[in-house]
Image (cartoon, helix red, strand yellow):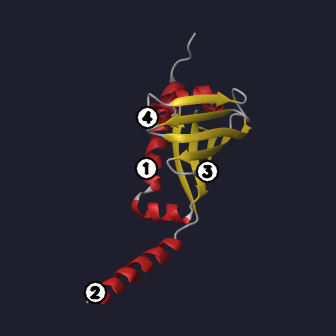
Amino acid sequence: MLKTILLVAFSAVALLLIFTATRPDTFRVERSASVKAPPERVFALINDLHSFNQWNPYEKKDPALKGTYGGTRSGQGAAYAWESDKVGVGRMEIVDTVPASRVTMKLDFFKPFEAHNTAEFTLRPEAGATRVTWSMQGAVPFFAKLVHLVFNMDKMVGKDFEEGLVNLKTLAEAPAAR
């Protein structure tokens, strides 16, 4: 009887590991929103990391978050590192920009789990507004594949992206300060 139970348990674990190995090696999370502002205005709120953190949903999750800016203020080379008990430890750096069109960032997460991803913001004029798409993609190592079986990355991160895009929309559509 004990042998049968152990054999069934071993088989179940083996099947789980085999199934996990068949999962995708990469992930992509993407959300879009229409912002009633010109691409240049929206671009400035993404390409300058000081402005970015005015609407960044992760920055709002922990009032005790410690952030440090480095490199240039905006555009390629601008960087921001953070430490937080709630959001973890990481660093982002703008690695490429196309004015009023695209901002690409390298995201390095160190805690609670190490991950190296790419975030991209694309801006497209759309009937008097700007279509903003925020995406993140990266590799999914085996351990992360196991975690993804329980936690839906698209729903978890996607919810934060949606919140961030609402924040960005509110800021970009606000009347300019005089």
- Give the residue drawn at x 59%, y 53%: 137
Instruction: Work out whether 32 lies above or below 44.
Output: below
Q: Residue flagged by tag 2: what amino acid is it?
A: Leu
Mark 4 or mark 2, earlier in chain: 2
80 or 85: nearer the viewer: 85
| 66 lies left or right of 49 | left
Identity of the amino acid at label 4? Lys
Disc nearer the start of the sequence (3/2): 2
Q: CA distance from mark 3 to mark 2?
A: 45 Å
Q: Secondary structure at mark 3?
A: strand
Tell which circle, 1 or 2, labels the residue nearer the N-terminal end.
2
- Neighbourhood count class around disc 1 (C-alpha, 10 Å): few under 14, some 14–19, many 20 upward: few
Q: Are marks 4 and 2 in contact (CB under 8 Å)?
A: no
Mark closer to the observer (3, 2): 2
- Which one is in front, 153 or 144? 144
Res. 156 mark: 1
Q: Amino acid at mark 3?
A: Asn
Q: Decide: few, some or many residues near mark 2? Use Cα within 10 Å; few <14, some 14-19, many ≥20.
A: few
What residue is rendered at 63% in x and 42% in y?
A: 122
**Horizontal side, residue 36 vs residue 96: left or right:** left
Mark number for residue 117? 3
Residue 34 drawn at (x, y percent): 52, 38
Viewer-side label of 1, 2: 2
Disc 4 residue crowd, few under 14, some 14–19, many 20+, Cα 10 Å: few
Residue assigned mark 4: 61
What residue is disc 2 on?
Answer: 2
CB contact under 8 Å: marks 1 and 2: no
As helix, strand or loop, the secondary structure at mark 1 comes to: helix
Q: Is residue 132 left or right of residue 154?
A: right
